[in-house]
Amino acid sequence: MLMARPVIVAHHTRSGLAALNVVTAALQTDPLTDGVEVRFARDRAALAAGLTAAAGAGAVPVAAWSFYSPDFLESARDLSWVRARAPGLHVAGGVHATAEPLATLRAGFDLVALGEGEATAVALASTLIASGDPRDLPGIAFLRQDRLVSNGPGERRALDDFPAFNARARKWNALEITRGCIYACSFCQTPFMFKARFRHRSVGNVRAQVARMRESGTVRYARFLTPTCLSYGSTNASADLDAVEELLAAVREELPEGKIYFGTFPSECRPEHVTPAALRVLKKYVDNDQLVIGGQSGSDRVLRATHRGHTVEDVRRAARACLEAGFVPTSTSCSDCRAKRPRIARSPSPSPRSSSTWARGSTAMPSCRCRERRSRAPYRSRSTTPSGRRSSASSRGARCTDSGARSKGSRRTWSRSDAVRRLGSRSQILLPSQSPATTAQRPRTFEAAR
Ligand code: SF4
């Protein structure tokens, strides 16, 4: 059999960097693909140069892409630019490509890797080595006569099966300890992409990953990636504090001098899990003085409509518990910054339906970079139908396809005095309302993933 030599050049820019670290590291877990050369291109010129060099050396040049929705059009422009200058097979994966495979392929990508990418990356590289056709692989989508052909999502494997980052390339990222989410909030892509159940990385595996970071000599702290940090070790809605403590104790043993950031981005807490008992465990091990609470909305109606499974009072109670335990509570509304972004109070008596007020009588909140990012992205207007309803990608993928929504831009940090003032008896937290139609009409796409 004629063996080919693929060279993978990861377009390591903008969003999706961690995903590219993880899928390229997955190649190291299979003896056949362990030796596949992987390069990281910091911009489109480096990508074109890498692909050209690989082709010149007789290898099969493969470009790996991963991007969030706000970066889609920019990535498509980069793709056209690279295609005009270099040969290569262009494979797009990640949250946007999974949510919008047809649009992604029509933008010019050759293949889309649907869902989880690790097993697909190994299979794709193995197939290229064997000079096979990657379009036959599970987890791959492609166009045939401009129609989408999908082989279904990539194989969902145990987190322990793959590294959490690409240590060989010294590409570090937050250590993913849990994938999937049982809560299945209607706006969120996590259960759609990873299933509505938890898969946890084992304590032993986490310990090994942390040891690898420490041994590198360059990483002196551990951050974690999880949809809900206090669900670690749990299979249901209750927190398993013993499992959380076992995890944190193991990490502390591996990083006696290092910092542990847990319960802060990207490992937020659900409000109902933030109890005095949980905070005592966190206080023992973590170095962050903030806790990020996934509040999502100040409207019980919106929380119900989006199946969040908690109330506004849960968020208030969690914030108070944080303050009493010595943490600064920070709230996220990662689901849809545009709809929920707080603004300055404009009316002395705002109503949840008409107002976009964070707290009665409040001062201006920090501006939201997520909104700015989106407003620059032409994708916004493309995803709005003439009737004003948003299309499926923007509605269902808002959380995970927008790095801004998961980054600092979407957080409202309450200083201690600010929080006490806001949570005072005369304060009422109100967030901009969403039209009931917006949430009610959204497709419950996660159902398919259950
Ligand atoms: S918003 Fe958070 S809690 Fe809800 S489904 Fe997504 S990850 Fe889970």
Image (cartoon, rainbow, N blue to C red):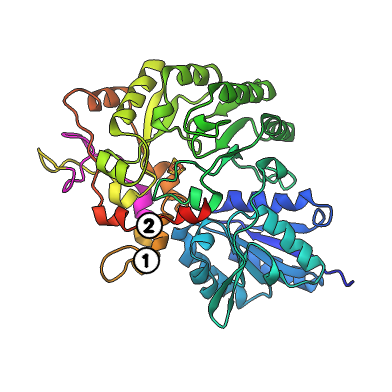
Q: Identity of the amino acid at label 1?
A: Ser
Query: Is residue 92 found inside the magenta-colored segment of the image?
Result: no
Q: Mark 1, residues whose alpha carbon is within 10 Å: few (<14), some, or many (≥20)?
A: some
Q: Is residue 38 above or below residue 201?
A: below
Q: Which quadrant would residue 83 be assigned to in this image?
A: bottom right
Along the line of sight, the residue nearer the viewer: 7 or 156 = 156
Answer few, some or many: residues within 10 Å of disc 2's Cα (few below 14, many 20 plus, some between 14 and 19).
many
Instruction: Give the quarter the ligand 1 occupies.
Output: top left
Q: Quadrant of residue 427?
A: top left
Magenta portion: prevailing SS class: loop
Q: Which residue is mark 1?
A: 383
Residue labelled 1 has its Cβ within 8 Å of some atom of ligand 1: no
Residue furthest toward the right? 1
Magenta-drawn segment? 352-374
Q: Residue 395 shows which numbered tag?
A: 2
In the depicted structure, whether residue 18 falls above or below residue 229? below
Residue 342: where, in percent of width, then height?
A: 26, 43
Residue type, mark 2 in image: Ser
Q: Within 8 Å: ligand 1 and the Cβ of disc 2? A: no
**Disc 1/disc 2 C-alpha distance (Å):** 9 Å
Camera-nearest residue between 52 and 321: 321
Q: Is residue 382 above or below residue 274?
A: below
**SS for dot 2:** helix
- Indicate which disc, 1 or 2, sits on the residue closer to the N terminus: 1
Of labels 1 and 2, the one closer to you: 2
Question: What's the residue at 20%, 31% (across, down)?
Answer: 428
Asked whether residue 401 is in view, the answer is: no
